[in-house]
Image (tube, helix red, strand yellow):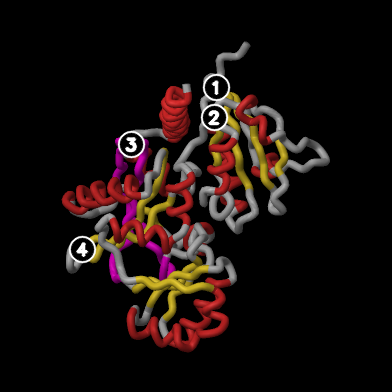
Amino acid sequence: MSNKRKVGLIYGGKSSEHEVSVHTALSVINAVDKARYEVLPIYIDVNGQWVQGPWIEHEITHVDELRFTLDNYETPNVFALNNTVDVVFPVIHGPNGEDGTLQGFLELIDVPYVGSGVLGSSVGMDKVMMKEVFGNAGLPQGKYKSYLRSELETNIEEICNGIEAEIGLPCFVKPANMGSSVGISKAKDRQGLEEALRFAARFDRKVIVEAFISGRELEIGVLGNEHPDTSVVGEIVSGNEFYDYEAKYKSDNTRLDIPANVPDDVVIRMKKLATQAFLALDCSGLSRVDFFWDEAEDELYINEINTMPGFTPFSMYPMLWNEAGVRYAELIDRLIAFGIERHEEKRANALVAEQFND
């Protein structure tokens, strides 16, 4: 019998970040230590169909090899995953992947998994709830307001009046539940604001409007569970007007400076604030925390936390840890260990409950 740990890799999904997820899966499969782990790829296609591929023991050369169909493979018995794998590594980005829904399912079938649990994932995905928690924790952030799609459909003129009065222009308009900068616009005037609100509402029933903060975009990685570590600080220098989907995945105008050229005291403050944000949302495993630094006023503002950040070797999160001395394969290894550790900690609660029922 093999002593290798069996890892179920769930990827794909129905969100607009499907392709990002497949590329992440390719990177993880090729980097994981094959002497220690067996990888079972479980693909969710754009229609939500689950397809289980074969156990992978070799290098995959192209993402197309990971887009399985039921013509060639089978639908997995997902309710028996806890009998099939030792741990699940979910690398689905966006809704139905990093928003707590998949995490809740994995909790129900009692299988260890990498990353934050239901609470941290769902709050981290919903930018409005995330900012509410940040505010309650005393973390510095810019002004914001949120609206439902139904409100925008019936009352957009009054809403725009309120935004101009309370937030001001320019401002950023975003879907509340979406990742990879999908659906984001920078509104500079009244017409642009109305267009941005309608555009964001195409992606989610809830829209958030954030005040424009003039500052440098800094990011830091968090790794661990109850006593997490933080990485070096990185800076995004975008040739686009802001770091949108185009700049993130398609443009050659974006530069990632790792480590960022910032004063030591800024790094120290970011490490403290990022850890506070991670713990405030009850996150675990991994997160990337994004900030704006107003260099003239020396003020840091937390922008958001991403509980399942881009995870190819060329994504910001792994690159930050690589600079800190944690290589990609080791990062995967640590995350698997943290996922199992968190599961064992939760199982200790069940043992206590059983004692009370005796």
Residues under numbered marks 1 and 2 in contact, where contact means CB atoms less than 8 Å apart? yes
- Element on which disc 4 rests: strand
Q: Residue at x 50, y 67 (%)?
A: 175
The N terminus: image quadrant = top right
C-alpha span from label 4 to label 3? 27 Å
Q: Residue at x 30, y 38 (%)?
A: 229
Mark 4 or mark 2, earlier in chain:
2
Mark 3 or mark 1, earlier in chain:
1
Which residue type carries mark 3? Answer: Glu
Residue under circle 1?
5
Q: Position of residue 330 (x, y in %)?
A: 42, 30
Q: Residue at x 57, y 29 (%)?
A: 7
- Element on which disc 2 rests: strand
| Image mark for residue 226 | 3
What crowding class fits label 4: few (fewer than 14 Cα within 10 Å), some (14-19), or many (20 or more)? Answer: few
| Image mark for residue 87 | 2
C-alpha span from label 4 to label 2? 41 Å
Mark 1 or mark 4, earlier in chain:
1
Which residue type carries mark 2? Answer: Val
User: What segment is highlighted magenta in the picture?
Assistant: 213-242
C-alpha span from label 3 to label 2? 19 Å
C-alpha span from label 1 to label 4? 45 Å
Q: Is residue 273 visible?
A: yes
| Image mark for residue 299 | 4
Which residue type carries mark 4? Answer: Glu
Mark 3 or mark 2, earlier in chain:
2
Residues under numbered marks 4 and 2 in contact, where contact means CB atoms less than 8 Å apart? no
- Element on which disc 1 rests: strand
Q: Position of residue 79 (x, y in %)?
A: 66, 34
Q: Position of residue 19 (x, y in %)?
A: 61, 52
Which residue type carries mark 1? Answer: Arg
Q: Residue furthest top?
A: 1
